[in-house]
Image (cartoon, rainbow, N blue to C red):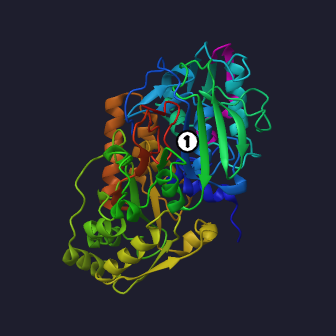
Amino acid sequence: MVMKRRDALRLAGLTLGAAGTTALLTACGASPSAGNGRGPNDASEATRGAFRAVFTGGGAGETLDPYATAAPADFVRNDVVYENLFFLGEGETLPGLARDVVVSPGARGFILNLRDDVRWHDGSAFTAADVKYSFEYMSSPERLYPSELQAYFDMAGIEIRSEHSVWVPTLQPLGDPATMLAAFPAKMVKDGSGAFTTETAIGTGPFRVTAFAAGRETVLTRFDEYWGGSAPSQELRILSVTDPQAKVNSIISGQADYTSDIPYTTARAGISAADIELDTAGSRHRTSMGFVLNTTRPPFDDPRVRRAAKLALDRQTLVDTVFLGYGIPGNDLVSAGAPYFSDRDPLPRNLDEARKLVRAAGAANAPVTIRTAEWESGFNASSELACEQWREIGLEARPQIVGLAEFYESEGLAAANGVAFSAPSAPLAVLYGRLNAHDPAMAFDDAEYCDALAAAMAATDDAERQRHWNMVQDRMFTDGNTVIWGLADTLSLARSGVQGLETRGHAKYPYLGEAHHA
């Protein structure tokens, strides 16, 4: 079976913070209806010229269409060209092109109140018609990577209420639609947009496209009529490369000013240049690394064996071996650092208790296959080491290393007992929704858990939301199927004096709208 690219991104979204199309409660019984800032920026200072950054590219597949992107270079470039209605700040959701959102009684819809001072790069005004068209565009089946919001919003029922006001009905109760709009793919495109070339890629962001060569370089020029104030750098140059060491070399040689997602081996070896800084995105923006256990087949259909798998892991050894110490042990829960995250201690290793649980479940010598590919650096190494540790408690665990193209193929996931995965510090609603909606092999189909998840999504009161998210995480920690053994630091390299970098969601793809040299 050949997997389509959009299917791969359903699960890859856990890693990339990008596309996918499935609904929240599919696995729970319901069917779908359809920073690392380096310093403050003062925009009144003199123009600082060009800022150059290098990211992993997608070769000839790179595009200016925000709903056909799959590479880090695409994400970073499009973030400063197109904008969201809301965006993620340091632990909170902040207004972007929308001033605010008013949730209706019962949380079955909301009003978006838009800014009235926004201009597109061609000088025309941003209005409610653009928002309605953007929702239609992002949910079209023609999109390669349609927005996941179509699983939550009734796109066909969206109404323009005024020039700067839009009504959006929802398919299930949503108490915090602003966070959904910030976290899921929701770039605004101009009414009528269809092709996205250098000439027609029109956004509202602080930079506009002036040159684009897929897989090589994009040149972006400051948009001086930007509603948020002129960017400090006159020009951004986004360089696309595929080799991690080449990214590092571009900084050392002076070809670029910044790059992210530095290999841990490079960091451990050290950088000798005095004018280059190795930095981390900080504890709030670590990447969760672990496994999702398949509860639809033995032995992980038994909660005792799932508990044993967690108790068997030597998390510190995994951190030291895979991250080379650039991280900390995880506590089996996703979204570390996000609001409402349950920051409890990781389970201590207890081989005796794990062996007892395996024997009590009748799972001694049970075969266990962990599906893995080097989708993220460390997937294969961590799978091999975890399987070694699981063999110590009587499970016949072996990694199944496959190619990237077949990694997320549904039949392969269904046949495996678990799959390696990683996830950024995204809002809980995003990651738990994706986990339970992607594939039955990855879902935790537990009635108490699913009820708590639906209640957490629907809650409008902060205290009520926290209570329900605590219940979601209690169930996942006690009997659930996520095994998060480590939280990895996100490392970057920058030349001295680089300032204004922001984390808006995923630390590996920073926002460069305020980036500049001191």
Residue 399: image location, x then y, percent? 46, 78
- Which of the 4 quarters of the picture holds residue 487? bottom left
Residue visible at 53% across and 46% down in the picture: 256
Residue at x 78%, y 33% (from the top left corner): 199
Residue at x 57%, y 75% (from the top left corner): 402
The residue stretch that appears in magenta: 148-165
- Residue nearer the viewer, 253 or 402: 253
Where does the N terminus fall, quadrant-wise? bottom right
Q: Is residue 510 magenta?
A: no
Q: Nearer the viewer, residue 122 or 137?
A: 122
Q: Position of residue 316 (x, y in %)?
A: 26, 66
Count of numbered marks: 1
Residue 84 is drawn in which quadrant?
top right
Q: Is residue 343 left or right of residue 186?
A: left
SS for tag 1? strand
Residue 518 pos. (x, y %): 42, 31
Q: In front: 296, or 390? A: 390
Q: Residue at 66% across / 38% down in the picture?
A: 219
Residue 436 visible in rendering:
no
Q: Callout 1, which amino acid?
A: Arg
Q: Classify 10 Å Cα crowding around label 1: few (below 14), some (14-19), many (20 and above).
A: many
Residue beneath disc 1: 52
Give residue 247's position: percent from left, percent from top. 52, 55
Q: Is residue 108 above or below residue 59?
A: above
